[in-house]
Image (cartoon, rainbow, N blue to C red):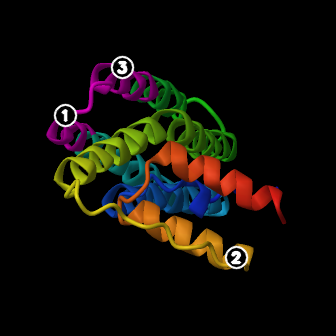
Amino acid sequence: MSFPRWTNALTVFHPGMDEQHRKLFSLAEILWLSVNEDGEMIDRAVQDLVDYTYSHFAHEEAFLVNIGYGGLVEHKRKHESIFRAVDTIVDKYATEDRKVFVNELSIFVAEWLVRHIVAEDMEYARFIAQQRMRRATDTAPPSQPIAPRPPPADPIERLRRLKAAFEEELISADEFDTRKQEILAQL
């Protein structure tokens, strides 16, 4: 069985949050790989993963407060449910076989991360993109309309430019998703 890994499909288009998500996946994989190690290494891997998870959630929640994200209360509830689930699994650590525990916790964290990023964190990614679009349209001079450039013929180049436009906050997340699907449909 291969371990779930972070991919670019999980990016929330915020370098700090993306880096923290990658680190969570790495720590979960380190735990998963420690299954045949001694108890001390497993203990350290568990502690690192749990500590970083709590730290990440605190950073993410502070970030959401800072950007004025309206879905913060619900997002915090999701984090709290994960804390309870992780605590339940860690409580079983003393009574279960280490291999069962290591596999259960590491797979749980990685699979939960994927679901959480796709379902919850992408919501704040869209919020950020919408805020950036609003700022861009509020500050754009009305007398100078931007003439669209014809799209390049190569679909890969079109995808690169589309991603660059999104990263530069020139288009919203919804527009990015729509255009991306159109380009991919042409392949």
Secondary structure, mark 3, is helix
Mark number, residue 74: 3
**For the residues marked 1 and 3, what is the alpha-carbon distance in whole angstroms?**
14 Å
Which of these two is toward me, 3 or 103? Answer: 3
Secondary structure, mark 2, is helix
- Give the foreground label among 2 and 1: 2
Relative to 39, say whether 68 is above or below. above
Residue type at mark 3? Glu
N-terminal label among 2 and 1: 1
Residue bearing the label numbered 2? 156
Question: Horizontally, is 173 left or right of 95 in the view?
Answer: left
* Span highlighted in magenta in the image: 61-82
Residue bearing the label numbered 1? 68
Q: At 73% from the left edge and 73% from the top edge, which residue is drawn?
A: 155
**Label 3 crowd bin: few (<14), some (14–19), many (20+), radius 10 Å:** few
Residue type at mark 2? Ile
Residue type at mark 1? Gly
Residue 4 in view of the camera: no
Mark number, residue 117: none
Q: Position of residue 43 (x, y in %)?
A: 45, 52
- Give the foreground label among 2 and 3: 2
